[in-house]
Amino acid sequence: MATQDQNESELDQFDHRILDALATDGRMSITDLSSVVGLSKTPCQVRLKKLIDEGYIEGFHARINQRRLGMDHIAFAEVKLSDTKEQALSEFNAAVRKIKEVEECHMIAGRIDYLLKVRTSDIRKYRQVLGEKISSLPHVASTSTSVAMESVKEGGI
């Protein structure tokens, strides 16, 4: 079985160009993509299919302007668990995935166990999500919140 490092070394400059171009514009036509990466259309399509089939590309998504939807309040909830055995972690992970307001959830090494990025319409809605959903997750011992004052960079681009 190949390791992740071995798989990454199998990607050449054209594969990396395809990934970079699609990360910037996932709706790019195959004609434009082939032009950007310096391949003709058919080899570009073959490489794109391979990148999808091998899991380098997990999907194509629209990046929604949350501010236009009135959902520009971002808070980061630090979560400390009362139990960090594997079953407790699995129960927490499964439950947190069901909270639509939690955009991201990361297990952290350090003084806290998880860091959650939570998006709501305002601080009142966040307080409700924290009190009724996040604090009720399995094995939550405590939470602490930091509120974003401005988003300087989001979405990895």
Image (cartoon, grey):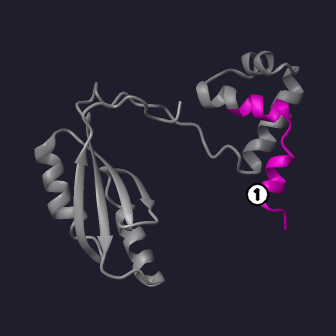
Q: Is residue 55 magenta?
A: no
**Residue at the spot x=84%, y=55% of the render?**
6
Q: Is residue 131 left or right of residue 86?
A: left
Instruction: Please identify the dominant SS of the magenta region.
Output: helix
Q: Mark 1 belongs to which amino acid?
A: Gln
Q: SS at mark 1?
A: helix
Magenta segment boundaries in residue numbering:
1-19
In the rendered image, residue 137, in percent from the top left (x then y), is placed at 28, 70
Q: Quadrant of the N terminus?
A: bottom right
Residue 13 visible in image: yes
- In this figure, which residue is indicated by the disc labeled 1? 4
Q: Is residue 21 left or right of residue 42?
A: left
**Residue at the spot x=65%, y=22% of the render?**
28
Residue 26 visible in image: no
Rendered position, 88 above or below 151: below
In the rendered image, residue 81, in percent from the top left (x then y), is placed at 32, 75
Q: Is residue 30 left or right of residue 114?
A: right
- Where, by quadrant of the figure, is residue 39 drawn? top right
Question: Which is nearer the eye, 129 or 8?
Answer: 8
Q: How many marks?
A: 1
In the rendered image, residue 96, in percent from the top left (x then y), is placed at 35, 64
